[in-house]
Image (spheres, rainbow, N blue to C red):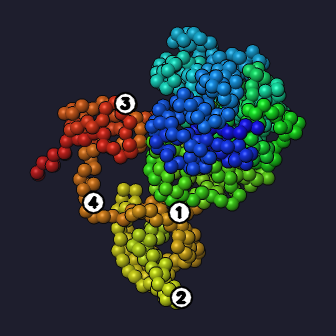
Amino acid sequence: MLKKVLIANRGEIACRIIRTCRRLGVATVAVYSDADRDALHVELADEAVHIGPSPAAESYLRSEKIIEAALKTGADAIHPGYGFLSENPGFAEAVAAAGLRFIGPPAEAIRAMGLKDAAKALMEEAGVPVVPGYHGIEQDADFLASEAERIGFPVLIKARAGGGGKGMRRVESAAAFKEALASAQREALAAFGDASCLVEKYITHPRHIEIQVFGDDHGNVVHLFERDCSAQRRHQKVIEEAPAPGMPEEMRHAMGEAAVRAAEAIDYSGAGTIEFIADASEGLKADRFWFMEMNTRLQVEHPVTEAVTGIDLVEWQLRVASGEPLPKGQEELSIDGWAFEARLYAEDAERGFLPATGTLSHLALPGGVARVDSGVRAGDHISPFYDPMIAKVITHGSDRATALSRLSTALEEVRATGLTTNAAFLCRLTKQADFVAGNPDTGLIDRHLTELTMAREASPEIIALAALELSGVLESKIPKDPWTALSGFRLWSEASDFVELEHRGRHVPVSFHSKGQGSYRFTVEGRDIELRLSGSKWAYDLEFDGRRHPAEVIRDGNGVTVFQNGESWHFGLIDPLAAEDEAAAGGDRILAPMPGLVKLLRAVPGAAVSRGETLAVMEAMKMELSLSAPRDGTIAEVLIAEGEQVLEGAVLLTLEAASPPPLA
Ligand code: ADP
Ligand code: ADP
Ligand code: MG
């Protein structure tokens, strides 16, 4: 067995790898950037080496720095995790050249699967069904248009060097083809430095089903069954499960065999995933799945496979890298029950899934039967530099319904404050009728986007609870001296008060008075309600309409977040003076709604702009956002330049003060 492993990654996956190393008695070395100085993976590892500034290009992507750190600490192998350098054949070679073991497949296998067109050609040769389409080298627009015609619309244009869902365009008709091609090529060139594209038949009613494969250095290859990753948004996985619902045994067998054939064709060793697309328009059929691509690394969603097979895939990776044969043969592997994984992110589903950054002032992740893989803890900062993942929540059960209801419950238990998360979106998805029925397809989330992301109004009772917390009334419940603690005398003290809350940019006036025994009468935005409150510290029961409604409140700084049934609402307390300043300035400044890169800037001082006109385009992680003029006016200052990285809330542009309305 390896003695010491350096993990060339960060966040949850670094922590997850460290956990298995520790269990196997393998020492660990973490690497970290400036932003990650106090990160959890650094704390968990036996040793840690600083490798550079926060941007990934200057730290986690610096192969020479990472190899140097491994040599300096006496590590014998490097685990690349996922993302970053994990699918970089040059890195795999450099690691080997330095006399270290790369925990992953041989560089040639990574290279063979690195470009989607070459990979498809190779798979065709190996007898693996590939998506019908054109994946040759010819890139002439007229030629590709005629190929699209031949394949038949709709088609999907893909960047051959693509990944993370980038550089893809679905095209419905010949008329729209060339423009879509040009835009896919532009995006591909910018993201991957390679404009080449392939054209595929767009599979209707598509399901993304992938097979986990594993190989060793002794010529053995097995598969560990499938994962269904059809719940996607913008070609990105949201919730994954294993096995795939409605999968006929015959199809599972055919897919497993095809995946093993694919891996054998490139002398694969280590963990890998063969991604297939299936046409589910008439249910899953053994002759209706096609190879899409291979990911030559450990996948984000590997825990669902671990849950149903009982195998620690990282342990297998370490064993294979140590030269051991695969611990199990194909006939010793089987599926036990059902598993789900949900990706919990710091992002704002209501606002188009903008990545959110900030400090996780409070974080409590589900306990109980859920497995939670996380790389952050309360007090940590989610920076704009990396993937804003907070945790993966994984549940297992004897059947799909049990595993799914455990996932819903676990997601309802997520308590994160300080920034916006996608917990409510995920929780709603676990209850969405088609998803519950086991009919996921890659368009499901988009079709139901409104119900999955729409802001839910806070009830007057939730607002009332926030008002009580922010007015300080509830604090008197925590007795300050032993006498009151003993007698409980001051509990639910008589009080009446008026507070003005800030909620979603709105002022919400609330007045209340206590009637004793935890009963209160409120006026919330002019509406009268009564409720009785019981409970402790942060977990309350709101009693009204003859029923108890549990809710939790978490205080952070000047605000409070109320959690109920998987939803949450944040409230601030209005400071009247600050509020006026803000209102006056509001319409005159254009702020960055998220941290990211200013990709395009169309503003010059003195220029007249009209309301709604696009002034800048920002890019962060995997999305683009246009910023438009909030009103007609004249640009006063431009405070940023194209290509600049900015923090959330940074002032990008200002407009000249609006002239007062003419006197009548
Ligand atoms: P998976 O199928 O395992 O989700 P992806 O390639 O989509 O594989 O993503 C794996 C990880 O790689 C992501 O969670 C992220 O950390 C990183 N990643 C992939 N694509 C991008 C991208 N375009 N920008 C930033 N990070 C990315
Ligand atoms: P990436 O490298 O970005 O992960 P993939 O080729 O794996 O690219 O495709 C990403 C997603 O796009 C798939 O999971 C699937 O939802 C969708 N997709 C890809 N190819 C097709 C196709 N031919 N027809 C329909 N959907 C597709
Ligand atoms: Mg993919």
Task: Please identify, in this view, whether the residue under mark 2 or under mark 4 is nearer the observer.
Answer: 2
- Above or below, 342 against 158 in this view is below
Tag 3: residue type? Gly
Check disc 4 and report the residue beneath it: 578
Task: Please identify, in this view, whether the residue under mark 2 or under mark 3 is nearer the observer.
Answer: 2
Where residue 143 sits, quadrant-wise, is top right
The secondary element bearing badge 4 is classed as helix
Residue 313's mark? none
Check disc 2 and report the residue beneath it: 486
Q: Position of residue 553 (x, y in %)?
A: 50, 67
The secondary element bearing badge 1 is classed as strand
The secondary element bearing badge 2 is classed as helix
Tag 4: residue type? Ala
Q: Position of residue 216 (x, y in %)?
A: 78, 29
Where residue 212 sits, quadrant-wise, is top right
Q: Residue drawn 59% across and 11% down?
A: 137
| Left or right: 258, with 82 as reference point | right
Q: CA distance from mark 4 to mark 3?
A: 33 Å
Looking at marks 2 and 4 on the same chain, the residue that comes earlier in the sequence is marked by 2
Check disc 3 and report the residue beneath it: 643
Q: Position of residue 656 (x, y in %)?
A: 19, 42
Check disc 1 and report the residue beneath it: 563
Q: Are marks 1 and 2 in contact (CB under 8 Å)?
A: no
Q: Are marks 2 and 4 in contact (CB under 8 Å)?
A: no
Looking at marks 1 and 3 on the same chain, the residue that comes earlier in the sequence is marked by 1
* Res. 200 in view: no
Respond yes or no on whether mark 3 lies under 8 Å from ligand 1: no
Q: Residue drawn 53% across and 31% down?
A: 65
| Left or right: 105, with 332 as reference point | left
Tag 1: residue type? Phe
